[in-house]
Amino acid sequence: MQREFPPIRGFIENTLIDWEGKIACEVFLPGCNLRCPFCHAADLVTDSDQLESIPVSDVTQCLDRHEGWLDGVVISGGDPTLHANLESLIHEFRSHGAMVKLDTNGTLPDVIEGLLQRNIIDAVSMDIKTALDQRYYRAAGTECDLDAIRRSTQMIMSSGIEYEFRTTVCPAFVGSDELQSIAKTVSGAEKYILQQFKPGNCLDPAMDQVEPYPREKLRQFAAELSQYVGLCVVRGDWPSDQEG
Ligand code: SF4
């Protein structure tokens, strides 16, 4: 019987930056249950029907062509956990010798639990938008079940697989207090990434007017948070005037 796969609406043949220490290809699945105002994947989130549909065979042929060179596939979105047949896709990639990393917003812990229990993902990156309190909906663009997100963090931390938590440090929603709160939520985690916010093509055009924190400020945040986690690092693109 032919397996059903979720639609793929974006494909990068190789990336060195989306799975640290690995050479991976990356697929993007459409749809998301959040509407983060600073999101750069507006097409995937709200208008994915307009995007080209990429056959799964394009990805598996790429894996076969680069056998021994590509380590695996990053499955990103949108949020991949929304797709009922996500596991079929994971099995398909694994059957071509690829390891699999999942990118998720952590709102569907039952799906994450199933993938972890069946031991079919090798790594997971989970985004935490801001402090897990009554203001979370502002950064997520919609109401969220905060207990579900907390459950995902705990499950991932005790999973035994490679993982990281990430926050896009958009000054409209995230400052020192929020970062301290997030770091306490994931206290004891191996890795926490502070991603630089990038204005331009945001889901909410108002975000394009928000000035990102300077690199030095993010480094200062990371230094403050290092007491809670194994490693807290800054990631992102920087204008040349902030290099150094
Ligand atoms: S940034 Fe937010 S809205 Fe955009 S894909 Fe991620 S979770 Fe969904």
Image (cartoon, rainbow, N blue to C red):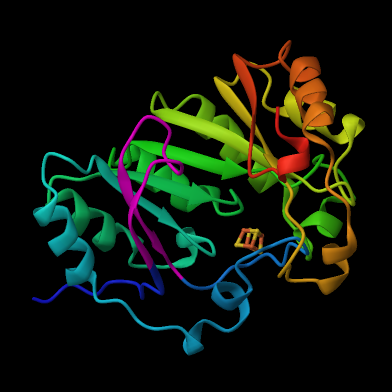
Which quadrant would the C terminus be assigned to in this image? top right
x, y percent for residue 8? 36, 72
Residue 118, given in percent of the width and then of the height, sits at 29, 42
Residue at 60%, 67% in the rendered image: 41
Magenta residues (range): 11-29
Q: Nearer the viewer, residue 107 or 243?
A: 243
Q: Residue at x 82, y 51 (%)?
A: 136
Magenta segment includes 244:
no
Query: Is 16 a magenta residue?
Result: yes
Q: How many dots with numbers?
A: 0
Most distant residue in the front direction = 241
**Closer to the camera in the image, 41 or 116:** 41
Q: Position of residue 152 (x, y in %)?
A: 57, 40
185 left or right of 11? Answer: right
Q: Is residue 37 above or below residue 42?
A: above
Where is residue 121, by image quadrant?
top left
Residue 222 appears left or right of 88: right
Q: Residue at x 81, y 55 (%)?
A: 139
Q: Given the current orientation, which residue lies at the most extreme bottom position?
A: 50
Vertical arrangement, residue 42 with respect to residue 128, above or below: below
Tell me the quadrant of ligand 1.
bottom right
- Residue 160 location in percent, x, y? 40, 23
At 54% across and 73% down in the image, what residue appears?
Answer: 31
Question: Would residue 196 appear left or right of 109 to someone viewing this image?
Answer: right
